[in-house]
Image: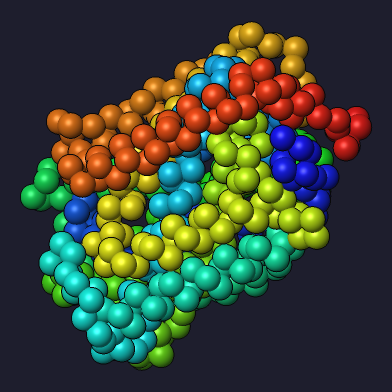
Amino acid sequence: MTASTLGGEGFSRVLARKDVLALAFGAMIGWGWVVLTGNWIQSAGSLGAITAFIFGGFAIVLVGLTYAELASAMPQVGGEHVYSYRALGHFASFLCTWAITLGYVSVVAFEAVALPTVVEQLFPGYAVGDLWTIAGWDVKATWVAVGVAGSVVMMAVNYFGVRTAALVQKVVTVLILAVGVMFITGALFEGNTATMDPLFSVEEGVMGGIMMVLIMVPFMFVGFDVIPQAAEEINLPFREIGRVLMISVILAVFWYALIILGTSLMLDGEALGSSSLAVPDAMQAVFQAPWAGNLMVLAGIAGIITSWNAFYVGGSRAIYALAHSGMLPAFLAKLHPRYKTPTNAILLMGLLSCLAPFLGRQALVWLVVAGGLGIVIAYLFVALSFLVLRQREPEMERPFKVKHGKLVGIVAVVLSLGMTALYMPGSPSALSALEWALFAGWMLIGLALYVWSRLKYGTAYSDKMMQRELSGGDPYPGH
């Protein structure tokens, strides 16, 4: 296998602080808050839903601290891939990275289903041409076409360089923030606390309702880990990488809690039950005008773009890192000679994204839950890697060093285990048979490719490539 097969000269460091913050925050806020906020309030109650996001956000902040330290210490492409290899070994590194890749691919596929769903709010009745019915939902030809077209556009944006992707991300994230501030401030002035009843779920009980929302929290917060994936393209001192990562997580916690609060202040239980998209309806109620609801829908489309864009970056870099180290077929490690993007990995993600709309709207929930399990498994591996490296390599240079590291690591491991347990049989929020099939199918495909790659390239080659990654020179001496 030649050097050119594995991508030539490497990535270009072009992402500044604002680019990185927009990439991570834009990834985390996405579209889910527009389409799912009403469901969260109905499942857990207004205060119950906020509690789920604050508790889940606290867990993500602790996991994020472990990421921040490791990302500053090992700023190589692939993020989790590198940390888990150094701490836990070859196979653990593959499992961790393949699990988080499921999370990234599921978000990219989710957005391909979300886009035609939100376009329907702006152009009712545009979906025509019966194809088939899946899970009681009629899949229409024009509906599928919108999802596929969006997938192709986002694939092209990422194909032609991370600079293009970063510019798109900054512009669109500013639009979302502006509309969000309008909505939240308006709801605080115009809203009524009486509409927040019930504060907690009556049907499921307090804890049952909170758990039903909590299972979706990892999927909603996935995105800060795009920063470690793109570490070799970030033009910042390594300590700053950790800081920006933590700022993005904290901002997202506030965003979700305030969006839930604003919606529950404007819509009572009956209005939530009859609403297909609660946040745009709440925005319309704030300003008493249809334009306000449409503006929020446009902000939702902007969220689709930011999330879609960021996870093309994160997912393609994770696939590239696995292929570059001989854990996946080498053709997936090809870098474009001019644009310095992992082109074949991006094309693979684009193909998977284009297939998702053919499954219909029910795929939204399947993708959230199956992808969420992959995400929390990766978080568990990273938290374990953090603890192992603190114990085994205490002298390793850590530009962003977490205070009380052992305690933070242990709590992050416990919380990651707790989040994983939410998906297991016996939990009120356990995966369905179809969701287990999606997860198991993804892991089995990955294992088959891993075994094939090990047989073709050999263990020695793979370890050599990983050691080369870990011993990379510091482009910022003294930081």
Which quadrant holds the N terminus? top right
Q: Nearer the viewer, residue 340 or 74?
A: 340
Residue depicted at 55% across the width and 36% down the height? 328
Would residue 458 be found to the left or right of residue 291 on screen?
right
Q: Vertically, is 78 above or below 186?
A: above
The colour style of the image is: rainbow
- Residue 345: give x, y in percent of width and height: 58, 51
Above-or-below relation of 461 to 30: above
Of residue 24 and residue 83, the one placed in the foreground of this image is: 83
389 horizontally vs 176: left or right: right
Residue at the image point whose x is 60% and y is 46% from the top: 332
In which quadrant of the rendered view does residue 440 lie? top left
Work out whether residue 357 can be spotted: yes
Q: Is the residue 268 above or below the residue 20 in the image?
A: below
- Which of 70 and 157 lies nearest the eye of the viewer? 157
Residue at image coords 41%, 90%: 291
At a point 74% along the width and 56% down the height, the residue shown is 336
Name the foreground residue: 312 vs 175: 312
Q: In the displayed structure, would residue 169 be above or below residue 116?
A: above
Extreme residue toward the right, this view: 477
Quadrant of the drawing holding the C terminus: top right
Give the quadrant of residue 77: top right
